[in-house]
Amino acid sequence: MPRSPRYLILADENFGPETSKTANACIRYTPDHVVGVIDRRQAGRTAQQVLGFGGAIPVVATLDEGLALKPNALLIGIAPAGGQIPPDWVRLVGRAIEHTLEIWSGLHSFIGDIPELAALAKQHGVTIHDLRRPPAKLPVSNGRVREVAATVVLTVGTDCNIGKMTTQLQLLGKLRARGIRTSFAATGQTGILIEGRGIGVDAVVADFIGGAAESLVLECAAESDLVLVEGQGSIIHPSYSGVTYGLLHGSLPHAQIMCAQPSRTAINRCEWVKIPPLVDFIRMSEAAAAPLRPAPVIGVALNTYDLDEASALRAVETVHRETGLPTTDPVRFDPAPVVDAIARFHETRPR
């Protein structure tokens, strides 16, 4: 990372609560390193006004306006359809490089592989960080996680972009505050950006997704007693279930935390796939893990950002009553119910 990163985030025409995951997480967890956001539609507003958090971080319309905020890095904060970089972004990134801004990207299309941008970066001595670029050599998974003493907890979800990474980051500090040596295994580009290490497992060749997850858990378990693994996708997602199962079988969790959004009844952009009742979904997720290692769902983390306060509280109570599990929205409310569940499980599970 830059010695003192000052990110100008590119989220043009997509800066919002559900459409700019990388931008939002960077603003939530590293706000001191964000100087502004580029988005023509939201220009003139602040991050607080757009997201409900982020304070006075300004939204500007152009790169030139952003340069006035004195950034030293350009972070691509959204994922265009297909993960490909649009032609107008190539020009914008090129101009950012000419102004000696480091480039940080989590796209499937690697910025460093675009010849004109690679040449510009070399000319101006600029580093391009492609967060999704996997390590050159990864093993296949073969159950080596069974040999570690650390407790492994994986977030799973009813859909993509539902709060699996955010939940783990909300729990991380609370568990550490209780004196439990806890680490975070980042498996997506945003988690890597925040944690400073990890593997973007959705960019790994399918046969090695489990091996990537296994390698991450082994690395984290060598330095901690509890490993929080960032989940991806959903076991019923027609597009991304492959990475979900790869993570589940590679990380071999001892327990799962289920992430759900009460207002979401179908898979985003695949409305023909209806999300089963949460009690049924929990059974499905436990059944998927069971042949390799039983991994009960021990808590539920809800995403209630689109509900008013009273409705959100009712949703938490309803899920708690229906599942019998500790339930909270770990961002909006106290994460303690799920933190307590993990701490209790960690302290009492058979060794």
Image (spheres, rainbow, N blue to C red):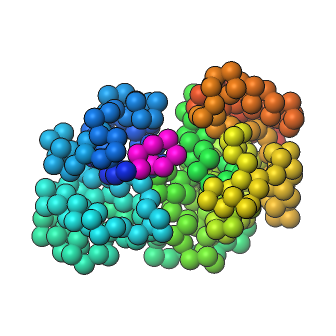
Residue depicted at x 32% and y 28%: 56
Location of residue 205 with respect to 187 vertically, above or below = below
Residue 5 within the magenta-colored segment of the rendering: no
Q: Is residue 273 left or right of residue 223?
A: right
> In front: 50, or 2?
50
Q: Main secondary structure of the magenta part?
A: loop
Residue 345 location (% of width, % of height): 78, 38
Q: Is residue 140 left or right of residue 11?
A: right
Q: How many marks?
A: 0
Residue 170 lies in quadrant: top right
Residue 140 location (% of width, % of height): 64, 75
Q: Residue furthest top?
A: 310
Q: Can residue 178 be seen?
A: no
> In front: 265, or 104?
265
Span of residues in magenta: 14-20
Residue 143 location (% of width, % of height): 73, 67
Residue depicted at x 29% and y 75%: 114
Location of residue 222 with respect to 88 vertically, above or below = above
Residue depicted at x 79% and y 40%: 298
Residue 211 lies in quadrant: bottom right
Residue 107 location (% of width, % of height): 42, 64
> In front: 198, or 283?
283
Residue depicted at x 57% and y 47%: 165
Q: Can residue 184 be seen?
A: yes
Q: Is residue 72 left or right of residue 156?
A: left
Residue 139 lies in quadrant: bottom right
